[in-house]
Amino acid sequence: MKKITYLFLLLVLCLVPVLSACNSETTDEGEDIGEDAGKKHKIGILAPAVTHGWVAAVAYHAEARAKELNSEIEYQIQTSSNAEEMTSQLDDLMTWGAEAIVAFPQWEGMEVPIQRALDEGIKIVNFDIVIDSADIYRVAGDNEDMGIQGAKYIVDKVGTEGNVVILEVPSSGSVSELRGKGFTDTIKEIAPNMELHTYATKFTREDGLKDFADILTSLKEIDAVYSMDDETSIGVLQAIKEAGRTDIKVVTGGGGMQEYFNMMPENEDIWIQSALYSPAMVKDAVDVALKVLKGEEVEKETIIPTTIVDRDNYEEFIDANSPY
């Protein structure tokens, strides 16, 4: 009897390592992955409320990508109307247990709450907007190059002398600053005799219409308009039409709006241009967040190159399924 008991105990002891190995799978390198197998990472997404078609498309594409990654992540997406609301939603995501947050902080005042999240060990991937922190990952189009290409485009179409209206958008922070810098620095270099007139507006067609209608009454001769946004530019074009002005030869834009693309061949008297800045880039931001959480090597900054669209190539960029 004692002999049988002894053999039974010996058999159990031999099986323990085997059972342990079965419960804890290892990689070829010997890394234990059993406990993490099937684990979903928690990613929060913060975007502005829909006040602009491009912004609406950002939220659309971010959620679309999150759904595609359903097997790897849990996600929550929040939209807000100001910095205070976004700060509150950031706190909610932290309470939820977000490991990474993809943020599109379109207003000033988000630096402190984002730094607080970083201090808690949460990975932050900023989309588009610059916040000065070495710990933040960022995905964006090349805002400064958009300005550079806009300057080159206008000089190519109207020459090195004339009157150019710059429509800046101070409320957009670094977006307007970088696009404006690229434009003015390049004009000073390649067309120093160009007269520049700078006015503030917003990224909406309503503001573009209202503000440019006022500008048209104060400036009797305008050769080109450096507008930074397609929605603003649609308002500008409407103001030009309503005023019956024929002096303006170029209106630039930015974003990649389908409605704006379709306007390009309709007016042979004005070169309508857009510096493509696709809202679908936010998908790359979601991908960066997941890669960081998985421990993969990721560049701190991912910059998408500028593409210029006008009547010569707009057909290549028509997308009937685009929400913008």
Image (spheres, rainbow, N blue to C red):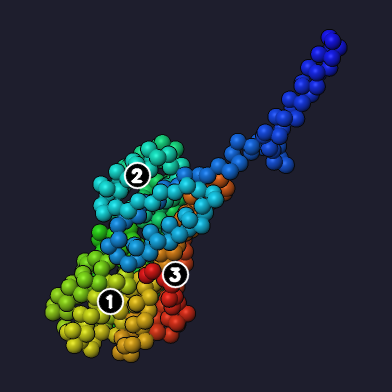
Of circles 3 and 1, the one toward us is 1
The one nearer the camera, 100 or 244, is 100
Of circles 2 and 3, the one toward us is 2
Name the residue type under label 1. Answer: Ile
Whichever of labels 1 and 2 marks the residue nearer the N terminus, that label is 2
- Residue hosting label 2: 90
Residue at 72% x, 42% y: name it: 28
- Residue hosting label 1: 234
303 on left or right of 249: right
* Residue 273 screen position, x and y as percent: 36, 78
* Residue 103 screen position, x and y as percent: 38, 51
Whichever of labels 2 and 3 marks the residue nearer the N terminus, that label is 2
Residue 306 circle label:
3
Q: Quadrant of the N terminus?
A: top right
Other residues around mark 1 within 10 Å, as few (<14) / some (14–19) / many (≥20): many
Residue at 37% x, 87% y: name it: 265
